[in-house]
Amino acid sequence: MSTPALTFSHDQAEAFDQIAEALRALGIDLEDETLSPAQDGRALIMAVMGKAGSGKTMLLSHLYKSLEKTGAEIVSGDYESRKKREKRSVAILAPTNKAASVLRMQGVPATTIHRILYTPVYDPEYERIAEWLAGEGERPEMEGLTDQALERALAFYKTNRSIPGALAAAGLRGSDFITGWKRREDPLDIGLIDEASMLDDRQFEDLKEIFPALVLFGDPAQLAPVNQSGTMVFDKLKDEAKLTLQRIHRQEATNPILDLAHALADPEIGFEDFERLIEESARKDDRVVWGQRVEVDLMARSPVLVWRNATRIRLINAFRRVHGAPEDALLPGEPLICDGLELPLKHRKRRLDLEARGLIKGAQVVYLGPGRKPGFSRLHVVGAPDPQVSAASIVKIEMPDEEEPFIPYAARMGATFLHGAAVTIHKAQGSQWENVQVFAPDLYAAARMGRNEAGQPLWKRLAYVAITRAQERLFWVVRNRLSRPEFPLSTDDLPKPAATLTLEAEE
């Protein structure tokens, strides 16, 4: 196809053409921008694989825009009208809020896999507002909701394309307009899945139940999910279903971080050789820093990446000490990582509500302060479209040489959190930060152990994943030291929402 080939590299254009040909067989013609009704029994699974800098995100973005031009409906996960329409649809998904937010920043309306698996159930009265915002109904007149409130909702929706956020901007609480969440029953059409290297077999099976057409985008050099024994879901696909992108050399010349990541592919390079490359890069380009200590001010928003849990716990406690954090409380601005939900099965509705608002395992969160109820916390969910929530929380602060964590806040049930000033490289997959600090002594320990994963030295896979989390600047920290903070912890840097959604996860 001639149009994308003007901007694509040769392998990107070839991959685009192969995907377009497969979609054409399903009734979606990207070249003529036409759609035909979906046919039962027609299925497609393809994988676009490539290392960092190979142009996977560019290809995904072009594919989304081409599908949108055909008239395919974009499914957001926020709201779907009950009005049945014979339209083809496409959803762009990522495993985590942070990964989805990276795509949204590039103009791709991505959401999380969970928000597609479960759909919100709207109160019928407030659903009229949602239909109006989505352009499917007349402007509603509702008692207790002023014209000014509706205008605020409309202005928010035009900018953010979020129905829950728009309703919150009108002064409504989530519990006012969303009565629950249900497992999706009706299938969708086309799914474009970013960061597919993070998918496990169960998630992949869920997606295949919903989408007859799936295009996976992933990096085979990353770490496989912890429960997959070193394999990724696209390893099981037939060779003809796999499209491989090579490195784009015009990007290499201007990005020393990518140069370092790709140098790890050399089978002859050892750990000491690699560190010499980092030192050389640091002398030539300030986007690579040979660090003699961990910079504590960066830890509040971008965690130090480590391999060993003992290192993670030690750095977290050092971070809290230098900020003067009390043992029995959190300071506003402290980073947290959602470690799952502690809710019994009978509270399934509450679990879905928490997860749908972004509090899924691995979500990055900033503590804002205590909530109005005992055991509740006000939280900013990083990367979520409507980031500020108030939820029942169980916060665990792990201590060195202690089996049981200290718990400064504990509701009877709700979202559980670990501290987020340092995280393991496994947990960092799917996320990116402007500045990334990699704790090199941990990778040296992995190199000394001589472990392999999927035929590659483990330290190289760890280093590759850690390095490619950096968007702008990489700090390679070689000594076990911590700087003193130049600034106190704060929440002033966080975007201000239109309203706060309260998640009542307790009686």
Image: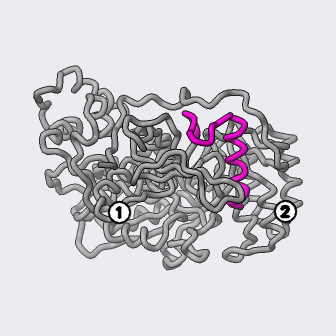
Which residue is located at x 26 percent, y 64 percent?
Answer: 187
Q: Earlier in the sequence, mark 1 or mark 2?
A: 2
Q: Nearer the viewer, residue 329 or 226?
A: 329
Image position of 286 (left or right of 490): right
Circle 2 sits on which residue? Answer: 271
Name the residue furthest top: 148
Taking 352 as reference, is 45 above or below it?
below
Q: Nearer the viewer, mark 1 or mark 2?
A: 1
Q: Position of residue 2 (x, y in %)?
A: 47, 53
The residue lying at 49 percent from left, 34 percent from top is 369
Which quarter of the rendering shows the N terminus?
A: bottom left
Residue 318 spot, x, y in % from top left = 72, 44
User: In the image shown, does 317 or 502 lie closer to the viewer?
Assistant: 317
The foreground one among 125 and 251 is 125
The image shows residue 434, relative to residue 94, as above or below, that is above
User: What range is drawn magenta here?
Assistant: 308-334
Which numbered circle lies on residue 331? none
Q: Position of residue 397 (x, y in %)?
A: 60, 50
Q: Give the answer, above or below, for where 242 lies relative to 125.
A: below
Residue type, mark 2 in image = Phe
Q: Is residue 325 magenta?
A: yes
Q: Dot 1 lies on which element? A: loop
Residue 58 visible in the snapshot: no
Q: Residue at x 71, y 41 (%)?
A: 473
